[in-house]
Amino acid sequence: MSHQLPKVIVQDLGRISYKEAWDYQSTLQQGIIKTKRAGDEVPPSYLLFCEHNPVYTLGKSGSIEHLLIDVESSPDFEYFKINRGGDITYHGPGQLTVYPIFDLEQFFTDVHKYVRLLEEVVIQVLGSMGIKGKRIEGFTGVWIEHEVAIERKICAIGVHLSRWVSLHGLALNVNTDLSHFQHIVPCGIADDTKTVTSMQAELNTEIDLDKVKVELKNQFALQFDFEIITPGDS
């Protein structure tokens, strides 16, 4: 019997509030779980691309002390405590946030492998655009190292699984306003040998977001080995 590739619907949500995207992810995740429980058909997975309005999100293992401003008196920023792993991070314009809502039982049931593949997708995309990304042992995400000794985080990753269906994902700094990271201890890492960066900062030029989306989509399909479909395809 030939292997049936998982089917993944790719959607670009554009600029969207964090709460709206979170609610949409949750709806898709619960829909996949419901279909799996029914057992009548194999549900498609989803790959969502978006940009958020400025927002700080705190993971379930994070500390509120890592948020350095009073968000209630800072109307330019939203704040949410959420159910992904990890500590605090920032999302905003110029940053590509990618949410794979994957039924991992159609791929593999290995959370560690899932996170490593998310990192690999980003490392390959950065490499195709002239930036050398890497992993750092003990720290999730993708990092950059240049001539100086400071390691820069360019992509944050945080996930949550329910019945092997994933939620949340990765946030890649493309043309991100890095000053907004000054209001937090990014990912809870208070270490003066580590900081944050963006593709724009590394290449010293504004990056075409649409080009990065295409590269990410293609790398996801390559690393996870799935068939891209559009709504309405059989």
Image (cartoon, grey):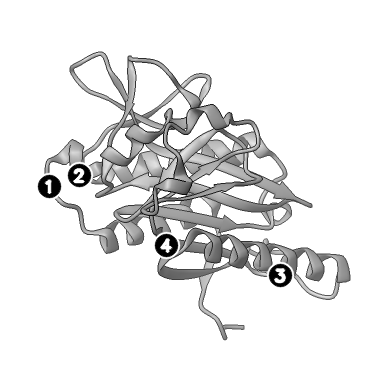
Density class for disc 2 (Cα within 10 Å; few <14, some 14-19, many ≥20) is some
Q: Could you tell whether 157 is left or right of 76 in the image? A: right
Question: Which disc is residue 34 wearing?
Answer: none
Q: Which is more foreground, mark 4 or mark 3?
A: 4
State yes or no: discs 4 and 2 in contact (Cβ < 8 Å): no
Badge 2 or badge 3: first in the primary sequence: 3
Q: CA distance from mark 2 to mark 3?
A: 37 Å
Asked where in the image residue 31 lies, by quadrant, the reply is bottom right
Figure quadrant of the N terminus:
bottom right
Badge 1 or badge 2: first in the primary sequence: 2
Q: Which residue is mark 3?
A: 43
Secondary structure state at the residue bearing disc 4:
strand
Badge 1 or badge 3: first in the primary sequence: 3
Badge 4 or badge 3: first in the primary sequence: 3
Q: Could you tell whether 229 is left or right of 148 in the image? A: right
- Residue beneath the point at 37% across and 46% down: 172
Q: CA distance from mark 1 to mark 4?
A: 21 Å
Q: CA distance from mark 4 to mark 3?
A: 22 Å
- Residue beneath the point at 19% across and 36% down: 202
Badge 4 or badge 2: first in the primary sequence: 4
* Residue type of the residue flagged with mark 2: Gln
Figure quadrant of the C terminus:
bottom right
Q: Which residue is mark 1?
A: 205
- Residue beneath the point at 72% across and 44% down: 109
Q: CA distance from mark 4 to mark 2?
A: 18 Å
State yes or no: discs 1 and 2 in contact (Cβ < 8 Å): yes
Badge 1 or badge 4: first in the primary sequence: 4
Q: Specify the farthest residue to the left.
A: 204
Q: Which residue is mark 2?
A: 200
Q: CA distance from mark 1 to mark 2?
A: 5 Å
Question: Which disc is residue 50 wearing?
Answer: 4
